[in-house]
Image: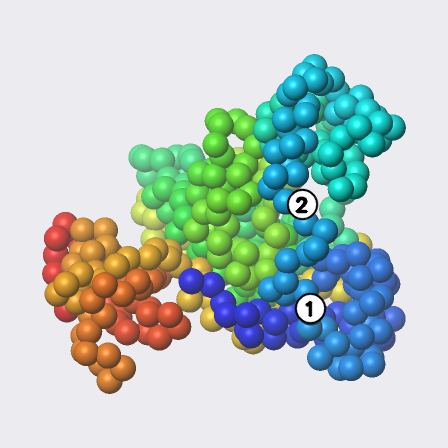
């Protein structure tokens, strides 16, 4: 269960006030301010006028909860697809659209929608396939101008220490190449990704964009090697959405060139240092990585951002433990228990209700191994360090 609307609005308004103050002090241009807020320059102008006239009330989006009268009906989408299949199979979208545009009176539509809408309607039905324009480029992508605008995260499996492979999870700021979080774990996954996000936010603040590969814990990809499903979120995607962070997928190793080059450097240096220090356990390796290697690496490889101002923001309304966790819904059993990953979690009686039988509740598995159960926004049960225990273990 995500943040309630009131909290989301408070976060959005606090972010706007911070950016607006920087804009008034002339430390931000209109373009930079609008980019930090994730809106167009025209939208930022309107927000400024509303804020100066009405204060925070001027920032409330009056469209929330209302369906746009211009929204296309499902029947309209089906009709455009039927028309294409009936007469225009094999036509390009541009060719098809030209017929709609110049012979509009022949077709039973209220009005002609945009080219992009028609293209999306046809591609969603797999009636046309949009070809890739141009060839693959190998130019280095320019860095973001400010720290905190984009954070990369990637993992590398390697024999870093001892006699077995382990995963190194690194989060890195795009503008400066600073490692914002790094640690060894047995296997990369949802927990490791959330841990990297949490450590970065605790140390620096909330950032704007999160750039990763298309691993299964980051994105749902219906077809191997294909496009991600933006509508079906993983646990990591859901947490990023609640934090207001845009999640950007990379579609090739070259797209992640900056983090790939960083890992080549680390793979060349870190194993040698760990061997030199006679480090053979994960605990010792993590202590060395966090306390010695990362500070040294950042000092040597960090670059100055184009703009000295930071985009990292300290948002007071956020409780990271309730966002960066696994969330799953369950129906309470007749004996007031919940089944979760082989555990039988007993919900105790409380002053709010005698029992929660047949109620839909949310089970949250936190990064520290504890489990909590929520009924709406009400915390009704807590369990500590039970994750990973045997199946069908009853926990009271």
Quadrant of the rendered image containing residue 393: bottom left
Please give the name of the residue rendered at 65% of the width and 69% of the height, measured from the top-left corner: 12
Which residue, as the protein is rendered here, is positioned at the far top?
A: 90
| Relative height, residue 375 to residue 236 (above, below) | below
Residue 288 seen in this snapshot: no
Label placed on residue 61: 1
Helix, strand or loop status at disc 1: loop
- Residue lying farthest bottom? 351
The location of residue 276, given as percent across then percent down, is: 42, 43
Disc with the residue nearer the chain's start (2 vs 1): 1
Quarter that holds the N terminus: bottom left
Cβ atoms under marks 2 and 1 closer than 8 Å: no
Looking at the picture, tell me which residue is in the foreground, 379 or 137: 379
65 lies above or below 84: below
Say few, some or many: other residues with alpha carbon within 10 Å of mark 2 (under 14 / 14 to 19 / 20 or more). few
Q: How is the image coloured?
A: rainbow
| Residue at the spot of label 2 | 72
Please provide percent x and percent y for residue 345.
19, 63
On-image quarter of the C terminus = bottom left
Task: Report the number of discs.
Answer: 2
Q: Residue at x 26, y 59 (%)?
A: 331
Q: Is residue 340 above or below residue 10?
A: above
Q: Cα distance, mark 2 to mark 1?
A: 21 Å
Which residue lies at the image location 33% right of the left edge and 69% below the top edge?
A: 374
- Judged by depth in the image, the label closer to the viewer, 2 or 1, is 2
Q: Is residue 386 left or right of residue 97?
A: left
The residue lying toward the viewer, choosing from 65 and 228, is 65
The answer to whether 382 appears left or right of 130 in the picture is: left
How crowded is the residue under tag 1: few (<14 C-alpha within 10 Å), some, or many (20+)?
few
Residue visible at 23% across and 63% down?
A: 358
x, y (%) of residue 108? 73, 34
Is residue 35 in sight in this rendering?
yes
């Amino acid at each position: 269960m995500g943040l309630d609307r009131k909290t989301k609005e408070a976060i959005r308004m606090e972010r706007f006030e911070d950016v607006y103050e920087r804009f008034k002090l002339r430390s931000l241009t209109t373009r930079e301010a609008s980019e930090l807020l994730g809106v167009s320059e025209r939208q930022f102008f309107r927000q400024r006028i509303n804020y100066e006239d009405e204060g925070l009330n001027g920032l409330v989006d009056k469209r929330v909860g209302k369906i746009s009268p211009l929204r296309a009906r499902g029947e309209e989408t089906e009709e455009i697809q039927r028309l294409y299949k009936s007469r225009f199979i094999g036509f390009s979208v541009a060719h098809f659209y030209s017929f709609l545009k110049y012979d509009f009176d022949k077709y039973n539509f209220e009005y002609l929608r945009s080219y992009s809408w028609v293209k999306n309607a046809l591609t969603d039905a797999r009636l046309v396939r949009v070809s890739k324009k141009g060839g693959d480029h190998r130019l280095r992508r320019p860095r973001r101008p400010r720290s905190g605008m984009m954070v990369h995260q990637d993992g590398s499996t390697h024999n870093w220490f001892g006699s077995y492979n382990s995963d190194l999870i690194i989060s890195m700021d795009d503008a400066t190449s600073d490692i914002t979080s790094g640690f060894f774990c047995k296997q990369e996954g949802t927990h490791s990704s959330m841990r990297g996000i949490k450590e970065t936010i605790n140390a620096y603040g909330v950032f704007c964009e999160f750039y990763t590969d298309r691993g299964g814990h980051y994105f749902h990809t219906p077809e191997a090697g294909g496009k991600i499903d933006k509508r079906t979120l993983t646990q990591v995607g859901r947490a990023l959405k609640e934090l207001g962070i845009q999640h950007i997928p990379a579609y090739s190793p070259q797209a992640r060139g900056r983090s790939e080059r960083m890992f080549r450097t680390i793979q060349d240096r870190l194993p040698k240092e760990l061997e030199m220090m006679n480090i053979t356990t994960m605990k010792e390796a993590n202590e060395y990585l966090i306390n010695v290697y990362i500070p040294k690496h950042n000092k040597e490889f960090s670059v100055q951002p184009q703009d000295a101002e930071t985009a990292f923001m300290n948002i007071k309304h956020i409780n990271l433990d309730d966002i960066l966790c696994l969330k799953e819904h369950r129906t309470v059993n007749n004996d007031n228990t919940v089944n979760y990953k082989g555990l039988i979690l007993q919900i105790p009686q409380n002053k709010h209700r005698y029992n929660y039988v047949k109620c839909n509740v949310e089970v949250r598995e936190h990064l520290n191994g504890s489990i909590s159960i929520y009924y709406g926004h009400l915390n009704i049960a807590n369990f500590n360090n039970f994750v990973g225990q045997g199946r069908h273990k009853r926990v009271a």
